[in-house]
Amino acid sequence: MSDKCPAGRQRYPHLFEPIRIGNIRLKNRIIAAPTSPSMMTPEGHMTPEMAAYLEEKAKGGCAVVTYGEAIVHSKTGRSHNKQLQLDSFGVKQMLAEATRMIHNAGAYANIQLSHGGKFGGLSSVGGDAYESGPAYGPIHEFMPQGEVLEMPKELIYEIIESYGKAAKLCKDCGFDMVQMHAAHGWLMSQFLAPTNNRNDEFGGSLENRARFLMLALDEIRKNVGPRFPIECRFSGDDLKPDGLNAEQCIEVAKMIQDKVDLFNISCGNHEDPDMFCRTHPSAFYPRGVNVYLAAGIKKAVNKPVACVGSLNDPAHMERIIASGEADIVEIGRALLADPNLPNKALFDKADDITPCLRCYECFGETSKSETVKCTVNPIMGQQLKQKFGIPAPAAKKKVLVAGGGPGGMEAAITAAQRGHDVTLCEKSGILGGNLRPAGAAYFKEDIAKLCELLIRRTEQAGVKVLLNTEVTPEYVKEFDPDFLVVAIGSNELVPPIKGIDGDNVVMAIEAELHPEKLGKKVAIMGGGLVGAEAAIAFNHEGHEVTIIEMQGAVAKEVNSFYRGGLMPEVEKAATCYVNTRVKEIVPEGVKVERDGEEFIINADSVVCALGFRAPYAVVDALVADVPDYAIIGDCSNVGQIYQATSQGYYAALRI
């Protein structure tokens, strides 16, 4: 092997081995999996922000970049409020711009062709804000969201034709391949399901249920030509009694293998909350949890197979391909956390890959603001502004950062990389702040990895770190910084509850870091995210756990996507008392009131997880006499990791 060959090709030889799919030659085995943030115009056209989002993945070293869930028949198929509509007049221009940007950055462009089926006319996880007319599915049924009509055969053939038209349009706009979406509970998945008991050629037997998919693939092939790559996203197992099982998925894969060039094997159902967190694996599942499904399909078909399943470690990806479980890995959220993952692996910098926390903030933000963000990547969703470069600072400045949590470290790293003289002071003996208790649970390994990564980057950036050093107004005056970053975090809230100072009470942070201090029975006061995750962790350590929450639900503030995976674990780990108020902490446990009734919840240890409060008076004193400053993270307003890292990054850019 040439001395000029990047080290990653030797470390991960299978991952960086080229492969030919149809008429294109992939430079490596990494595809950016289909994602579809709602950065669309109301007409269903791609925006410059969306194109820049895709371009960044290409710059990061993927062989192929895939846009997800482009609707082929918008009259009946829109499953989200804002989706790319391939039959919308005027859609071509930005599609062509996006493919050129992807190509110019060194990758091939792929696009997923989709139809929501019955969710095209009903509210879904991603859509509830428009009227689209009747909902059509394989059969007539009544769902909680409304009535579903049996799709007439005339409409089936109209939609089949729309797949062909959409594929040709995408090819004309520069896409190098297309992907048929036949999984996750959308149209093709609905027709394939055993519940499709239509009495015509599109229902009943498995062969009949697969007919719609097969005819649509034929129509796509007719419109794109014999060598143009067609990928099919397909289930290895629907993992539901009313879906296809693994054996049936293999049978369908065999039926269509001569019509496609690549299989992308997923599982589950986008519209089932229990399955969503398996389709897009949560932190409660091991990395690569769905790879075995791709391996099962690969044994049965004669075409290359790609796997998915929250992969983010190049060494793991190498093992998957080397072992023959799959030919290609497709990566979704990990490329939001670090779009440069492929290049970092290629150039032997895998230890600098920012880990995806599987927190679902990317999904949550798409629903909330129709943009995208990432907890650990402050640039995500703002690529368009970044691509033209950031002006260098006018002068080198003396910067003091107070606090060594995620926000303080991010600010220090960015400021130092911009050429400033940066000193970071941390009053404890270790960097990390609340990342340390947050990363203590067995399912929070990625937060612990993020903490260590930020510490390494702080050292590598040349930041002067002073531990066991508290920044006070006097310290600030003596240091005399040109710019002060205040990132001192928040304080745990200790409410005036009788007995709160008892020996049986442990604050949440101390309990998370030292669960061995807890007795057998643990009562957690507070059912927010901290309390909910602590309950799971404590139960895993062998404790009997109870959660006491004043509101009507546990983890109410958490985005719905993460909560969907969190709550089943909470319910297994703890007894939850909601609408319940703490009256007093007593030696036997906690005296509470619910529905006018007082009773005691027995506990050996009581964990106080009642939230945090920003130390505004301390902050105000620190910034009173400095020429320029930024207040970031929890000491600005108690929030999550995203607020700390994002505010730290952009504060440093202003220096």
Image (cartoon, rainbow, N blue to C red):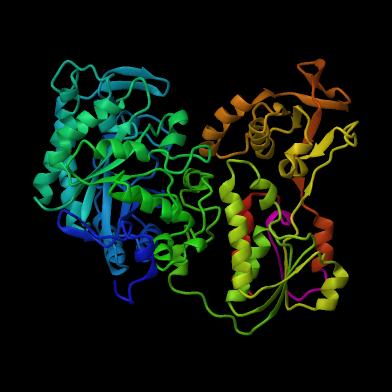
In the rendered view, tell whether residue 270 sits above or below residue 420: above
Residue 14 falls in image quadrant: bottom left
Q: Residue at x 82, y 64 (%)?
A: 470
Q: Quadrant of the C terminus?
A: bottom right
Any part of residue 40 in sight? no
Any part of residue 488 in sight? yes
Q: Residue at x 90, y 34 (%)?
A: 502
Decide which of 44, 317 is in the foreground and name it.
317
Q: In the rendering, at what x and y percent does residue 157 appear? A: 14, 32
Q: Which residue is drawn at 65% across and 34% down?
A: 532
Q: In the rendering, at what x and y percent does residue 456 appear? A: 60, 65
Number of numbered discs present? 0
Q: In the rendering, at what x and y percent does residue 626 appear? A: 79, 74
* Residue 631 lies in the magenta-colored region: yes
Residue 240 falls in image quadrant: top left
Decide which of 122, 601 is in the foreground and name it.
601
Q: In the rendering, at what x and y percent does residue 461 appear? A: 60, 73
> Is 118 situated left or right of 515 in this image?
left
> Outermost residue, bottom direction?
395
Decide which of 370, 485 is in the foreground and name it.
485
Decide which of 576, 172 is in the foreground and name it.
576
Where does the magenta region start and end? 624-637
* Residue 60 lies in the magenta-colored region: no
Q: Quadrant of the N terminus?
A: bottom left
In the rendered view, tell whether residue 182 sits above or below residue 576: below
> Is 581 situated left or right of 376 in this image?
right
> Is 218 situated left or right of 599 in this image?
left
